[in-house]
Amino acid sequence: MAVPKKRTSKSAKGMRRAHDFIKTIPATQLCDTCGALKRMHHICLECGSYRGQQVLVSKVEA
């Protein structure tokens, strides 16, 4: 069995574990216009708006 020759320092152990404590942020948010759940940095599929501007014609309007 492989056995480490040297002890792992506190610094090396901490650098290895740095990504264990990263918090994940949700990839969805509420639309400003209609309040529906949408993906971040994407057009709202319900109302067709992006950052407060109408980008697509929605199915309800057509």
Image (cartoon, grey):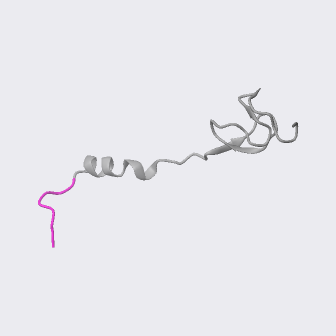
Q: Quadrant of residue 27?
A: top right
In the image: residue 61, left or right of residue 40: right
- Along the line of sight, which residue is nearer the eye, 36 or 9? 36
* Above or below: residue 61 compared with residue 4: above
Compared with 34, 13 (above or below) is below
The dominant secondary structure in magenta is: loop
Report which quarter residue 41 is drawn in.
Answer: top right
The range drawn in magenta is 1-8
Residue 56 rendering spot, x and y as whole percentages: 75, 33
Give x and y (percent) for residue 20. 42, 53
Task: Assign the N terminus to one quadrant of the image.
Answer: bottom left
Q: Residue at x 87, y 37 (%)?
A: 62
What percent of the width, then of the height, locates residue 49?
A: 75, 33
Residue at coordinates 15% horizontally, 67% vertically from top-left? 3
- Depicted 31 relative to depicted 2: above or below: above
Q: How many marks?
A: 0
- Residue extending farthest to the bottom is 1
Determine the residue located farthest toward the left in the rendered image. Answer: 5
Which residue corresponds to the image point at 69% horizontal and 42% vertical from the top-left? 29
Q: Which residue does the image show at 53% across and 48% down from the upper left? A: 24
Residue 61 is inside the magenta segment: no
Find the residue positioned furthest to the top.
Answer: 53
Depth order, front residue of 27/3: 27
* Camera-side residue of 18 and 43: 43
- Rendered location of residue 31, percent (x, y): 75, 38
The residue lying furthest to the right in this view is: 61
